[in-house]
Image (cartoon, rainbow, N blue to C red):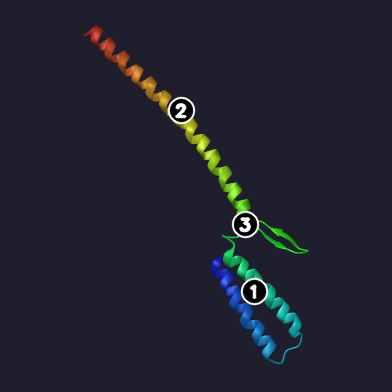
Amino acid sequence: MKIIGILLIFNALFLTIWWVCTDHPYKTWAISAGLIAIFVGVYFTIQNRVTEITIEKVGTIKAAADQATVDALAVSILRKRIEAQSATVDFVAQSATKAHKLINKLNHQLG
């Protein structure tokens, strides 16, 4: 996403300057659209470091904070599964040890 943000910034700058410096109508609209594109490009460039952006009369953007919450939940679920599997492996190992001792005992009694 960083490269898209950088390309968006450079393209917005180039096209806005070109539109304003040449003989085109609606220069105010071009400047407005260029500024919006530049802000979107900056957002794409720094989105991994941004937790929340509030734009007046538009709303709040929560990017990295929501993703971090989802990732933390996934890690928590994986941790519980690993702990449960660890208990199962311990139980199987204990059962195998008991079975091995029993086999050795039987071999000793028979032999």
Give residue 64's quadrant in the image: bottom right
Q: Which residue appears farthest toward the left when viewing the image?
A: 111
Q: Which residue appears farthest toward the right when viewing the image?
A: 57
Residue identifier under label 1: 38
Q: Nearer the viewer, mark 3 or mark 1?
A: 3
N-terminal of the pair, mark 3 or mark 2, is: 3
Amino acid type assigned to the residue bearing label 1 in the image: Ile
Mark 2: secondary structure: helix
Q: Position of residue 100 (x, y in %)?
A: 31, 18
Which residue lies at the image location 74% right of the left edge and 85% below the top edge? 27
Mark 3: secondary structure: loop
Q: In front: 24, or 27?
A: 27
Residue 87 in the figure: left or right of residue 70: left
Q: Position of residue 17 (x, y in %)?
A: 65, 85
Image quadrant holding the C terminus, namely: top left
Q: CA distance from mark 3 to mark 2?
A: 38 Å
N-terminal of the pair, mark 1 or mark 2, is: 1
Q: Are marks 1 and 2 in contact (CB under 8 Å)?
A: no
Amino acid type assigned to the residue bearing label 2 in the image: Ala
Instruction: Report the disc number at residue 51.
Output: 3
**How crowded is the residue under tag 2: few (<14 C-alpha within 10 Å), some, or many (20+)?**
few
Residue identifier under label 2: 87
Q: CA distance from mark 1 to mark 2?
A: 54 Å
Q: Are marks 3 and 1 in contact (CB under 8 Å)?
A: no
Which residue lies at the image location 55% right of the left edge and 40% below the top edge? 76
Q: Nearer the viewer, mark 3 or mark 2?
A: 3
Instruction: Report the disc number at residue 83.
Output: none
Which residue lies at the image location 61% right of the left edge and 69% below the top edge? 42
